[in-house]
Amino acid sequence: MCNIGLHFYNIHVWCYAVSLAMLRPMFCVKNWFVALVVGLGFSVAHGDARLHPLHDMNPLMLKTVSETLQVSEAVAGRDLPIVARVMPKKGSWDCSEKLWLLLDVQNNGEKSVMARAEVSCVKKKGWGVNKGGMYVPPGETRTLPVLIMRGMVEGRDRAALEGLFNDMRGYPGGHQQTGWRQLDASAINKIKLEFFTDALRVECEVSNLRATTRFHLPSDSELKGKYVPTTDAFGQNRNTDWKFKIKSEADFTKRFESESEWLEKFAVLENRSPYGGWTGGPRFKAAGHFQTVKKDGVWWLADPEGWPFWSIGATGFNLGLGKTRTPGIGNWNPRQQNLKRKYGAEWEKDYTAFTHRRLKAWGMNTLGNWSSQDFYLDGGTPYTVACHYKRPSIHEPNPKAHSHLPDVFHSDFRLATFAAVARFKQEAADPWCIGFFIDNELPFPQPNTPAHKALLSPKECASRQEFIRRLQKKYRTLEKLNAEWNAAFSDWDALAPVEGKAPAARVADLLEFSEAWFHEYYKTCRDAMREHAPDKLYLGSRINHWKNHAALNACAEYADVVSINLYDYTPDVFQPPEGFDAPVMIGEFHFGTITERGVWGAGLCTAMDIEHATDLFRGYAAEAVKNPLIVGAHWFKFSDQPLTGRKDGENYRIGFVDVADTPYPEMVKACRSLAEGMYPLRAGMNKNVEQK
């Protein structure tokens, strides 16, 4: 077995080697980074080092079938991973007292490898897996971490926790309260490994499986005694310290002055149009607005002047974000209060202007979803519009549903959609506007979901009525439907989902109606865009169930760009339907931590520290740039979420800046490096032009 201490420091010195010769900075990023850290008073100290998986000197070593797993196999295709499995020598692994699972991965191949892990347990809960990932350069060994999420802790009172902290996701001690990513930590029985690489072969050794870091959710009395109030006056964790933590209002002025000084050190990005397009390559025909262009099998956006544009951005440029309820304080918005302290009487104007200045220096060229007019109408940075609106919905009896599908066959649905798009008259004429997202993460996990939900809905639901009308036309009699569906409905109004194995006719009918629903939905949104924003790109609905090929195909038929929210460790997991040929924009991705600046929430994909998160960001974005379908990727989100959670409990450390508006310099460095090299990297894939 490998020495468990061999990679203790190595893990903090991340470097990404997949094609990153193309992504080398055009000025000395290393010197700039050191200067920025010193200038802002930063150190790379962790907010809670006790939770770091490599700081446990007494790891629990786990026995496996093979002490070292040799992975040596030819790669079938760029997006097709090599798969291997690590299994217990006997029974399962009991990791109930630990917080992390770690594996050492040695890359003996010629190019960098993304090693991705899925950990599962004996009795599946929720989705039944926890995931982790690590980029491993050739000739190096890296430690791949997976945070163990276990849902409600046995013996604890959920109501008591929620009474104190609402439905908060991350807690002191690293516990993550989640209902759909939980494992039985006492009975982990499999680790599935996937290896993605541009090399012709994967040559890796996997060893040293261990569980680390004591798991401890403080008792209710400990939580009340130590964590009420939870934060200081600035919304920061009052029980954790770090060198650059805001200690007084005077610190805001110091931070602003230091960052302003160091922003002056950034060289202007070379070969850029006013919109951030690339002037170093072929120019497309200018349209005065953003458009999609396909060049020899590779999709691009083109800016209003016709220059190739790849959208790298973040979401949540919004002055109002940051509301929370903090035990011991009450309802407030610490982020907004900090912005007022830092930027003064005209904080809205000055903060917005400073943010646009930051983005130009950092190399970020897009304001993503959830951004507000007070940010994007100032000009200076291309942006997307988030279009959300009230409309008739399919209200199936599910109290846990976070949203409902629109009732697309209701006569008012088309009217509501057209009215929603018509609200954005200024954006529709603004050349800085890339396009409109309409909706976000609609709940259709399966290709037949719309039909299933329609059958669950009340009689008044127009989509239900339309589905039944189609079935009546096809089968004529209820007896024939019952025979084909293996059902026993007493009348047409009694139609509902049928338990048990579905016969072929029922499967086909559910899918046929669902596909009709998808087409009606996306066609209506497309028609509204053509009517009220004809020069803007329709960017789809931000599909989070991106394995739903029926939804992807329908969206591709009507939208200018298919948007997906792809939370994973590499975009290479995205496998579009056969024959799919449409530009794709990743509307959300991120990598959170539980070890930085005192924030407890791990995010939807978790890194062990900010250096690891930065490496994952850089690698994910570079792989997206190299994908011929993907035309942009937006990080969720620009600022950390409140320590004590937003309305739905999310309290993730996922920002480019924290609650006090202090940047994470590691993330800034990675974004700037990516921006400097992404256009030559992508342009190397192109030959001929074809416009959509």
Image: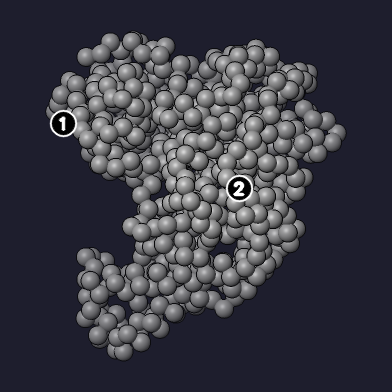
- Mark 2 crowdedness (10 Å alpha carbons): few <14, some 14-19, many ≥20: some
In the image, taking residue 282 as reference, residue 72 lies left or right, namely left
In the image, taking residue 157 as reference, residue 43 lies left or right, namely right
Instruction: Please tell me whether mark 2 sits on a helix, a strand or a loop.
Output: loop
Of residue 155 and residue 274, the one placed in the foreground of this image is 274
In the image, residue 322 sits, relative to residue 395, either above or below, namely: above
- Mark 1 crowdedness (10 Å alpha carbons): few <14, some 14-19, many ≥20: few
Residue linked to disc 2: 283
Of residue 99 and residue 575, the one placed in the foreground of this image is 575
Residue linked to disc 1: 91
Q: Residue at x 72, y 36 (%)?
A: 356
Q: Amino acid at mark 1?
A: Gly
Q: Residue at x 84, y 36 (%)?
A: 346
Q: Residue at x 34, y 69 (%)?
A: 511
- C-beta proximity under 8 Å, tags 2 and 1: no
Spatial CA span between label 2 and label 1: 61 Å
Q: Where does the image place residue 206, in percent across and percent down from the top left?
A: 25, 23
Q: Where does the image place residue 32, in percent across and percent down from the top left?
A: 63, 17
Of residue 457 and residue 437, the one placed in the foreground of this image is 437
Q: Amino acid at mark 2?
A: Arg
Q: Where does the image place residue 45, in percent across and percent down from the top left?
A: 54, 14
Q: Where does the image place residue 557, in percent across and percent down from the top left?
A: 47, 65
Please tell me in which quadrant of the rendered image residue 38 appears: top right
- For the N terminus, the image quarter is top left
In the image, taking residue 672 as reference, residue 622 lies left or right, namely left
**Sequence-wise first label, 2 or 1:** 1
Instruction: Please tell me whether mark 1 sits on a helix, a strand or a loop.
Output: loop
In the image, taking residue 370 as reference, residue 15 lies left or right, namely left
Tag nearer the camera, 2 or 1: 2
